[in-house]
Amino acid sequence: MPHVLTFSDDRHFGYLTTAIDQLRINLVAGRSIAIDFYATYKVSPQAMLFLLAEVDRLVHLFGVPRFKTITPRSPKVQEVFKQTGLYATLGVESDIQPKREDVIHWVAMSGSRVKSEELADGINRAAGGTLPSKTLSSLMKGIGEATSNCLSHAYIESRNDGLGHHPTTQWWFLGQLRGNTLSVGVCDLGIGVPRSLSIENDGQILTKIIKSMRGLFSTKDHWDVKALCAAFEIGKTRTERTNRGKGLAQTLAALRELDDPLLIDSHVSFEILSNRASYSVLAAPGRINRPKIKTLRKSIRGTMLTWSFVIPSHSANHE
């Protein structure tokens, strides 16, 4: 495994996604594998969520005996792996008790059905149990909707990763409080928004919408980027129909409509990664900045949604 597990730059992102691809290829070929974390000394929340989801799926399909784990020499990374449950998934026995302040607030969980109460509980636990109910409710308007929407389309076909089609609605969650910044993420390992959009929408309409959005991305951007941008636009057109509120457009609307006192002076960053596309915005009550669009070096073969925002240290007193 890479020394640094992060999605923040193309090089390390490519290292991690390639490493996961190699695990999958070797398991399909019938080989037992060794996952070598010995030199890993840094882990970011996005990369940790991706790793947890992929390893959990592979262990579920192939069984723990096929895996040998070489544990990291970094004491902090050992604590992270214990705290997030990665060690438990891989069958690694460890007496380590996470104690670091920037580790003990990592909260990981997974499920097969999206329950808003479950997500809300995970977010609040990651925040140390200090989020007022109004703040949590305000945040869940976008988080719950986006998660449900993506998962409802994620597993309609094979992921095309050599493992066949396994109908499921599996999702993974990771929350982390670092200082007074809370980061939460949810991901699936499905076909991705760009593919599901192409399957479930008329091709001519989709092409027309993409052409109308040319100013948002360049001609060099991957199709996944264009399709992901179109997904937000299609969501806007559907808000006038009977399924009002469904779609990624509602996620942005929820960010724009944040009215909680704790978030008035803060910004909420939101990013969605789906296959080879990245779409991120910075939002504050009443406004959303122009999205940043990026073609990823490799496909994550699924969708990851992340939110990050500052929690004032006195939040517990605002209930």
Image (cartoon, rainbow, N blue to C red):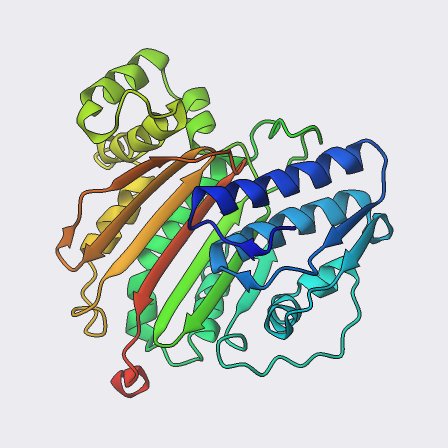
In the image, 89: left or right of 272? right
- At x 71%, y 31%, the residue is 163
Relative height, residue 318 to residue 168 (above, below): below
- At x 48%, y 53%, the residue is 186
Write down the quadrant of residue 202 in the picture. Answer: top left
Relative height, residue 33 to residue 190 (above, below): below
Question: In the rendered image, which quarter contains the C terminus?
Answer: bottom left
Q: How many labels does the image show?
A: 0
- At x 35%, y 70%, the residue is 181
Give the x, y percent position of residue 40: 62, 60
In the image, 287: left or right of 74? left
- At x 18%, y 43%, the residue is 290
Residue 24 in sight in this render: yes
Q: Nearer the viewer, residue 135 or 277?
A: 277
Judged from this view, the residue extending furthest toward the left is 286
Write down the quadrant of residue 310 in the picture. Answer: bottom left
Relative height, residue 257 to residue 33 (above, below): below
Relative height, residue 262 to residue 249 (above, below): below
Judged from this view, the residue extending furthest toward the bottom is 317
Give the x, y percent position of residue 200: 43, 23
Q: Which of 1 and 317 is in front in this view?
A: 1
